[in-house]
Image (tube, helix red, strand yellow):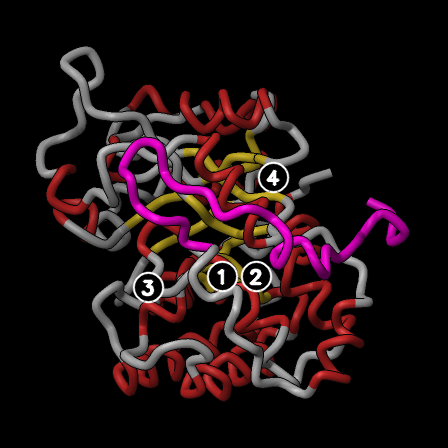
Amino acid sequence: MSGSTWWWPATRAATSPAPTSATTGRASRSAAASSRPPTGNPDDRRQRERAHVIITDAQAHIWDPETPDRPWPPGGRDFAHGDQFSADELLAEMAAAGVDATVLVPPSFEGDRNDTCLAAARAHPDKFRVMGRITLTDQASRGKLATWRDEAGMLGIRVTFSRGPAADWLTDGTADWMWPEAEAAGVPVMVFAPGGLESVDRIAARHPNLRLTLDHLALRTDVRDAGMDPVLDDLVKLAKYDNVAVKATCLPSNVTEGYPCPSLHDRIRRVVDAFEPRRVFWGSDLTRLSCTYDEVRRLFVDELGFLSPTDLGWVMGRGVREWLGWQ
């Protein structure tokens, strides 16, 4: 995509109506904080608002409700983000927060299904693309990656090694077939592997043409405050691999303070300094976010003064789109 097509919706978040979830009745995650003034320098903010970028969320989930005809896997309801969150609900949240596009990630609690996200991407090709799930334990999955991106709306795959039996798949050989197959097919892979950075190091070294993205800065969802630092110590060591990027997603949920989350600023800077802006992707993971959608956007746009307008362009959308091949 040419540089002339990137743009920055500087005022939409302040003027869009605040939606309410029709499914759950919860208030919009975008609306509550719009009246809070940002704490950054106004001149810096105006300069950054003149940057041109399609603001692209590197991760959000949508899913359908569990039904007898569409059962979730055992235990899925125990860590589900809610009964349902639809594409229409997400589009309303995006409009209110000034987010232009989103990488959809089917949630693991719904099982290895991609149909809901792919339907949304087909219906709204300018708004959505998909990093789909694949069943690593199914022999029938082998060979599928050669044509994976032929599916309309599909960019790559996302694999999780965080809970239950899947927590061991990174080290017990279950996932070994997938890395060379994805590399050969040119399929980018998003990986949520808290505690698995040593394994990711070996994978990145063995497969230099495989584009790996580490979700949530490799932080467990229950890590808070200073508990982030040992993980970041290990994470930044992987910046030496040109084929490794990171998603700076849902970070306010990893601190106990509210917006503007000042303790996050230096931690984010450390990651950006290591990976450089082109390999750090902003995102929300909206349905488990502890702040509003608008706040997680403003955290980067308004509060991180060390990011130049060009840096923001990469972090807020251009980087993830180029990395995943979202044309």
Mark 4 and mark 2 lie on one chain; the one further toward the N terminus is 4
- Cβ–Cβ under 8 Å for marks 2 and 1: yes
Q: Observer-nearest residue: 132 or 4? A: 4
In the rendered image, residue 166, in percent from the top left (x then y), is placed at 20, 46
- Identify the main secondary structure in magenta: loop
In the rendered image, residue 135, in percent from the top left (x then y), is placed at 30, 30
Q: Observer-nearest residue: 239 or 70? A: 70
- Cβ–Cβ under 8 Å for marks 2 and 3: no
User: Mark 3 or mark 4, which is nearer to you?
Assistant: 3
Q: From the viewer's perspective, tell me whether residue 93 is left or right of residue 316.
A: left
Mark 2 and mark 1 lie on one chain; the one further toward the N terminus is 1
What separation in Å lies between label 1 and label 4 (alpha carbons)? 20 Å
Which of the 4 quarters of the picture holds residue 184? Answer: top right
Q: Which mark is residue 247?
A: 1
Residue type highlighted by circle 2: Phe
Describe the element under mark 2 as helix, strand or loop.
Answer: strand
Most extreme residue toward the top is: 69
The residue located at (56%, 77%) in the rendering is 37
The N terminus - image quarter: top right
Q: Which mark is residue 281?
A: 2
Mark 2 and mark 3 lie on one chain; the one further toward the N terminus is 2
- Name the residue that disc number 4 marks: 186
- Classify 10 Å Cα crowding around label 1: few (below 14), some (14-19), many (20 and above): many
The residue located at (58%, 35%) in the rendering is 128
